[in-house]
Structure formats: C-alpha cells, structure tokens
Amino acid sequence: MKYAFFLGCLIPARELSYEVSVRKVLPELGIELVDMKGANCCAPFSIQSVDHASWMALAARNLCLAEEMGLDIMTLCNDCYESLLMVNNILKRNQELRDKVNQILSEVGKEFKGRVDVKNLVDVLYGDVGVGKVKSAVKEPINGLKVGAQPGCHLTKPKRIHFELLRGFNELDELVQATGAESVPYERKEMCCGGPLRDINDDLARQVSRQKLMALKDAEVQGVVTVCPFCFLQLDLGQLEIKRHFNEEYNLPVIHFIELLRLGMGMKLEDWEVKAHRIPITGILKDRL
Amino acid sequence: MKSVKSKNILGCLTCPLFCTVEKLESVALNELDLGFMGEVANTPRGKGILLCIQCGRCSSGCPIARLTSEHNPRRLMEMITLGFKNEVLPTQLPWYCLSCFTCLDRCPQGGDVGEVMFAIRNLAVRLGNMPAGVAAQAKSLYETSRVINPVRTALDRRESLGLSKITTDGLEEVQKILKRTGMDKMVKKE
C-alpha cells in the first residue's frame, strides 16, 4: 500500500521522534509513504474558527495535491485528520459548496474532484496492515505493561462520520494489545485532552488535561499511549505545567503508539528520542531503550 | 421569577421556566436582535441552531461545562435563539468550546451544537473578537503557509537526520486563496 504522507505543522516542528518512528516502522509493515510536496496547513480548529470558506479551500488544496499524486492521504495528527476528512466528505456530497470551493481554487489552477480518501495512522495499521500482521511483527512483546490508550477526540467523534467508515471504536486498544501491552479501560477515555484550547484559554486547557490524568491515575496505569501530537503535548508537557500551577505530580510517562510498536518490533529508540519525552519513559521501558 | 413581556411575545410564560440566562431580566427586550438566530442559521455550519429543543444533553456531556459555569452550550443555544447577539458575539462565550464534538454525538436532534460554535466564532471574528492565540496562528498561516513553525534546533535536527526539508512551496497559492476568501484582511487587522 502506498500513501500520500501528510505531516501537518506540529509534528515536523516539535515531535520529530514521532515522525522518525513512523518512517522507520511503516515500511517494515509494507506501507510506502510519499511526501506531499507543497502541502499547506490542514486548517485546524483555529483557522476554521476564523473563516469557513478559507478552511474549505485550504483543506481542499491539500486534497487536490493528493489527487494529483493519485494516492490516498495518511495523516498522523487527529486535527489534520478531522479537517481533511470533513472537507472531503462535505465536498464529495454537496455540489453547491464544491462549486464554490472550486471557484476559489481556480485562482491557483486546482480543482477538487473527490477521488481520494483520507486515512489516519490507526486506520492504516488496523485496516490495511491488520492486527494479526502487527502482532506477528512484534518480535519482543512488551508484556506486563499496563497503559491507558488515548485515541483523541477526532479519531472517533463525531460518530456519524466514523460509523459510515465502518470503524470500530476499540481499534487503538486492539493495536496496543497486539504489542503485548495491556490497554486498561479508564473513566473519561473519550474525553478531550484539552489541546484545542491551548493558547486560547490555557487555564481551562490545563484543567481538562488534569481531569484526564486524574482518571488515568485512578485506573492505575503505568503510562499513556497516544496517537495525536496534540494529546501527546498536552499530556506530556502538560504534566509539567500542572505541577507548576496545581502543585500535583502525576509522573505518567506518555508514549506514541508507533514508538511502542517500534520497541515491540525490537528496534531501539535513540537517546534524543527518549529525551523527547518530558516525563521520562525510562522507568517503564528500562531494558528496551 | 424572571419576567418576559412584550408585544412581540405571546406571554405564555413557558420561557422563564426553562431560562437560566441571568441577564434576561436586565436586558431590555428592544435591545435583543431577533434576527440573530437567522443570521447564525444562514452560515454554513450554523443550521443546527434551528433544531435545538433545549434538552441540555450537550451541556451535561461537555468537558468544559463541567469545569466552569461560564460555558454552558445549552444556554448559549438559548441566547442565540432569543437574540442575545450583543451578549454573545463580543464576549468570551464563543471561545470556550474545545470542538471535541462530544455534543454532536449527544444531541438527540442531530443539532450539531459544536458546529454552531464554529458559526458564532466566524461571526465573532468579523466583529474583531479574536483571541491572541488564534490571531497568531492565522498570521503565521498567511505568512508561512503553516500555523506552527519549527525552531532552529528542530530544523538542524531534521537536516542531521536526513528528513525531508520543511518548505513553504505552497505559500504563494495559500496567499492567493486567502486573498480570494478575504481572510488576509482579518489577519492584518489583528
């Protein structure tokens, strides 16, 4: 399988370890990634809040690039995923909006044709690679590690969109189990990490992630597994901010799913990648790093 | 007991039973903008407002409403329906929502409360109500085609790892698009 690789803004800027792990692991599982040249920002929450037409046109431009490449898009970030998926869905069905957006895009010589699909890393691992194949790729299962999985809001919500895609809502849990780790159910699993309010209302954003961390702590997990870079940032760096503002320490290491899988497949994380986690992961994954 | 009386209103007094808008007493009815609901409903993401039955399922599931009484999606829907334009658009009210879409799944009417939030934020921005964080991202988008840009150390690390260069190849087209939609003016204003 071959995908147009949509990196987004946050990952190449601040979470290089995520990108590196994806580029190392996916080819091993038979997924080829082709970088999208000239892609722009997906137009996330903040841009959607400013102007509707700009959101549609910017996301559609990215979809056009993928159409030109003839490949479906794979995103890593839930925000990019939601933005591109929604625009793709709307423009495929709503002729009126499609004409409007194409008028804007004609300015730059592009036209939305609706020929590609938008997928997320979890979609690709679960749907294309399959849990069975992931499991057999795990040479050194991470047995005995209890983690809480954080799929993030836009991987499963709004449900009516994802029902149409015939998605289960435990995909990430099944994938985590495939690495040998145990995905522990916890309260408020579907709750937001607070990330979207970062820089808009920092105090509330922190309080949301604090609630999430409390629920995780109550479930007695050893760590948190994320797929979205915003969730990672909010729960990992967020713990330091919570310590400063609320004087509470959670000490819950946060790790991206793909990094966990990489360790399970017997590949080591490099020193700088281990250090990219503000809450040290060395405690829970000692002998593997 | 809150009282609502006006020539335009039937006076059936059903609304005070459900109304929790504290300001209802202090706002004179002629200050209400009765076209506000229509204005919201006419935006691409605002149609859900027409379906609201004030059941409150959105508020009971909202992670922000749990933390602060300032944000209450049901009440916000009510304020829009009743025409509290000046109490909604220039204030902080549109900017509490996380867009986590919990309410979209919970609304029994398919009313898409979280989508209506985008509609009122779009209207608020046109009145100049844009938080600094959003303005900064919009500015960055217009100037570099991305909302977040890597710092020097990240760029150096990318190079040493042999990762693809972060380019702004799409910038010219992005600016053309934003000029066409008129968003460039909103960016410069801030």
Image (cartoon, helix red, strand yellow):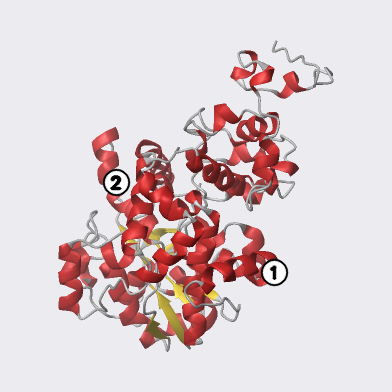
The picture places residue A214, in percent across and down from the top left corner, at 40, 42
Residue B25 occupies quadrant: top right
Between circles 1 and 2, the one closer to the viewer is: 1
The picture places residue B185, in percent across and down from the top left corner, at 42, 50
Q: Toward the viewer: B182 or B105?
A: B182
- Which residue does the image show at 48% across and 80% down from the upper left? A66
| Quadrant of the image containing the N terminus of chain B | top right
**Residue ID for mark 2:** A239
Q: Is residue A173 visible?
A: no
Instruction: Classify mark 1: residues with Cα within 10 Å, few (<14), some (14-19) or many (20+).
Output: few
Report the amino acid beneath label 2.
Answer: Gln
The picture places residue B15, in percent across and down from the top left corner, at 75, 22
**Residue ID for mark 1:** A95
Against B43, residue A27 (above or below) is: below
Q: Toward the viewer: B80 or B160?
A: B80
- Which residue does the image show at 60% across and 57% down from the upper left? A158
Report the amino acid beneath label 1.
Answer: Gln
Q: Are marks 1 and 2 in contact (CB under 8 Å)?
A: no
- The numbered mark, 1 or 2, whose residue comes first in the sequence reads 1
Q: Check disc 2 and report its element: helix, strand or loop.
A: helix
Q: Answer with left or right where residue B111 lies relative to residue A146.
A: right
Q: Toward the viewer: A232 or B83?
A: B83
Against A244, residue B161 (above or below) is: below
